[in-house]
Amino acid sequence: MEQYLPLILSAVSGIVMGPVTSKLTGGSGVGGILGGLLGGIGTYYGLEAANLHLFGVPAQGPTALKNILDYVLEGGVGGGVFGVIGGMLLKRKA
């Protein structure tokens, strides 16, 4: 279960931030959720592949507080960006 913790944290924070940013910019809530989920997961995998971390060198193990904050912030930022995009794509026309 410990190996899935970073992915779950990134996905959940993306799901939270996606609809928030989507609604703030006038988009759809459903598009924000879908975009947030995809953005959170995509950001996690992209930054892990590039070996980039917000707080420098990762601490030992995924359950260190520094790593948990890193995964939550990465997923939130990616989910927010993709949430705006998804919200605009699924926005109802008036």
Image: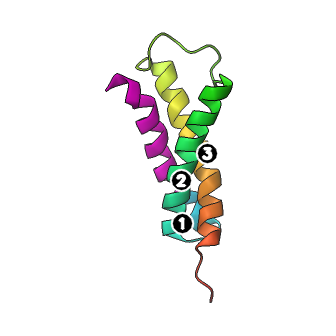
Q: Which mark is residue 48?
A: none
In the image, what residue type sits under mark 2? Answer: Gly
Which residue is denoted by mark 1 in the rendering?
A: 31
In the image, what residue type sits under mark 1? Answer: Gly
Give yes or no for residue 14 being in the magenta stretch. yes
Give yes or no for residue 76 being in the magenta stretch. no
In the image, what residue type sits under mark 3? Answer: Gly
Q: Quadrant of the C terminus?
A: bottom right
Majority secondary structure of the magenta segment?
helix
Residue 43, percent from left and from top: 60, 39
Which residue is denoted by mark 3 in the rendering?
A: 78
Image height check: is 88 above or below 54?
A: below
Badge 2: residue crowd in 10 Å (few <14, some 14–19, many ≥20): many
Image height check: is 35 above or below 1?
A: below
Image height check: is 11 above or below 51?
A: below
Residue drawn at the location 50% of the way across and 51% of the way down: 37
